[in-house]
Image (tube, rainbow, N blue to C red):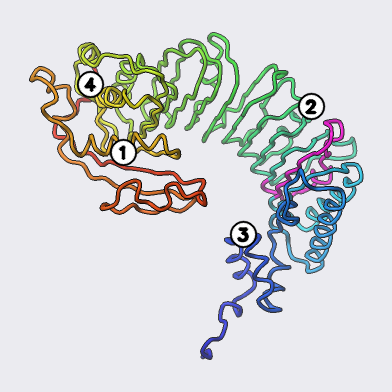
Amino acid sequence: MYAKGMDRITELPTFIIHHIMSYLSAKEIARTSILSKRWYLFCISFPILEFDQCYFLGKAITLMDISDEKKFMAFVEASLFRFCKLRFRMQELRLFQSFLDVKGSAPLLDKWIGLAVDNGIKDLVLMVHNMTQEDTVCILPQTIFSAKSMATLSLFGCRMEQPSDTTTIRLDSLKKLTLENVYINDQMFQKLTNECPSLEDFEISACWGLKNLCVSKAHKLKKLAIYTFYKDIGIVEIVVPSLQQQLMLTSVWFMDEEFDRFISKFPLLEDLLLRFCRLPEKVKISSNQLKNLHFNSCENLKAIDTDTPNLLSFTFSNLDMHWYLRLKKFLGVAKQIENLKLSLETCEVSFNLDELSGCSPSLPLQVGTLELYANVPLSDYETLLDGVFQICYPRTLRVSTMFEEDKKLIEWLYEQLRNRDVTCCNPHHIKYCWRHHLKDIKIQRYLQIEESFVVIEDNKTFADSKYMMDGRYPLTREVSEFNLDWSVPVSNDEQC
């Protein structure tokens, strides 16, 4: 029996308390340390250690001086030594720091990484903001290469140099590697990818020092993301037949038939995402495994020839109106598109609906969910919607916006779909007019506020929401889902 008011949570085993604490922020964890002596022990033994210089000092990086840096480093030093004395295994270390005195601070950073490695570190996040010139960028301590138990490594803003002759890379358990704004040369890149036998997820973004990027011996790699490179990058060569889950490329240039040969090397790939890449005018993709295909602002691309019977999601951003016919034909061939995302950006919607329906007289195709992102003039909304519904009749139309100007589209859709005018056209056009075939709609509106969702009640207008323009919620996103019930049979045989 427990007396009334007794703290039963405190009596839980330490590992359960630590699991509960893993859902709290570093600030919230720090607050629990003052509850009691037992909670103080929970805090200092918590195996996820996070040190953020800006949060600790309460000021921006640009306002810090050497004394601030020394104060923060003394705090990190004391906290790490205190934890290590408890003989707990370190699960994760997150360090976010700026360096004004890189050379003077290097020995301490080496010591901290060594302590983490000696305590069986599982996950390491090192984010360094250098306040000095490139030639004095913080060098990654080589003791990190002996972290045999480490599963995740994320590095930002440091310099990764090739290990000395006496140092061997022993990252045997490393499964996920993220490099962002890291200096790394070709030799180190090759050694790193070749000598991490368990690597499954690799992301490299805006790194410098590379002349050629070659990935060929990462035999267990399943996900690969390559983001923007500096202009001195030469060749990108990826030979990883095991690549299965995802390949994401940003700002990579392909010449003529090079893309077709490149993509054919990944027969098991399920997700392909290309952003700001330079592609041939026509690309060909043939795969029985591909499920999600996304093109975003890819230069020069005019036609996509696909043989992907299991494709579930297709995205092509920055479509112009000439793509409507090709998109409808693509949907007719694919037949199994469950989710379709359209991002339309144009200064003017110039196509003619009569010409579109005349060229493609078949009924619109069926898709499960259509996510629509549109940046067009308000005067073109009606033409835009007519064109979209000439291509497909979605069971769910989802529109999300973040900025006040974009909310006009949701408001307009709300009125058009709910109060549609069925006297809009002559009998000849009824077959191709969506207003005559939309039987019923149900509307659900909600706000995404950071990671939470708030439902907007039916009897309120969009402007009624107290969160809409509240400056305290900068990440507010309004989402509207229109569940559409169509009264006509939908053809899956495109004749155009």
Over which residues does the magenta segment extend?
124-152
Which amino acid type is shown beneath numbered disc 1? Answer: Glu
Q: Which percent across, then down, holds residue 171?
A: 74, 44
- Per the rendering, the mark at residue 493 is 4
Q: Earlier in the sequence, mark 4 or mark 2?
A: 2
- Residue 13 in the figure: left or right of residue 66: left
Dot 2 and dot 1 residues touching (CB under 8 Å): no
Q: Quadrant of residue 206?
A: top right
- Residue 358 in the figure: left or right of residue 24: left
Which amino acid type is shown beneath numbered disc 2? Answer: Gln
Q: Which percent across, then down, holds residue 148?
A: 75, 49
Question: Does residue 447 sit above or below 238 in this rendering?
Answer: below
* Residue of label 1: 411
Q: Quadrant of residue 136?
A: top right
- Per the rendering, the mark at residue 90 is none
Dot 2 and dot 3 residues touching (CB under 8 Å): no
Q: Residues within 10 Å of mark 2 (few under 14, many from 20)?
A: few
Q: Which percent across, then down, holds residue 155?
A: 72, 41
- Residue 116 in the figure: left or right of residue 271: right
How far apart marks 3 and 4 lie (CA) works out to 53 Å
- Please check the rendered image and state whether residue 148 is part of the magenta-colored stretch, yes or no: yes
* Residue of label 3: 25
Dot 1 and dot 4 residues touching (CB under 8 Å): no
Q: Earlier in the sequence, mark 1 or mark 4?
A: 1
* Residue of label 2: 187
Residue 102 appears in view? yes
What residue is at 77 percent from the left and 31 percent from the top?
Answer: 183
What residue is at 28 percent from the left and 41 percent from the top?
Answer: 482
Q: Which percent across, then down, holds residue 162?
A: 83, 33
Q: Nearer the viewer, residue 398 or 464?
A: 464
Which amino acid type is shown beneath numbered disc 4? Answer: Asp
Task: Say which element carries label 2.
Answer: helix
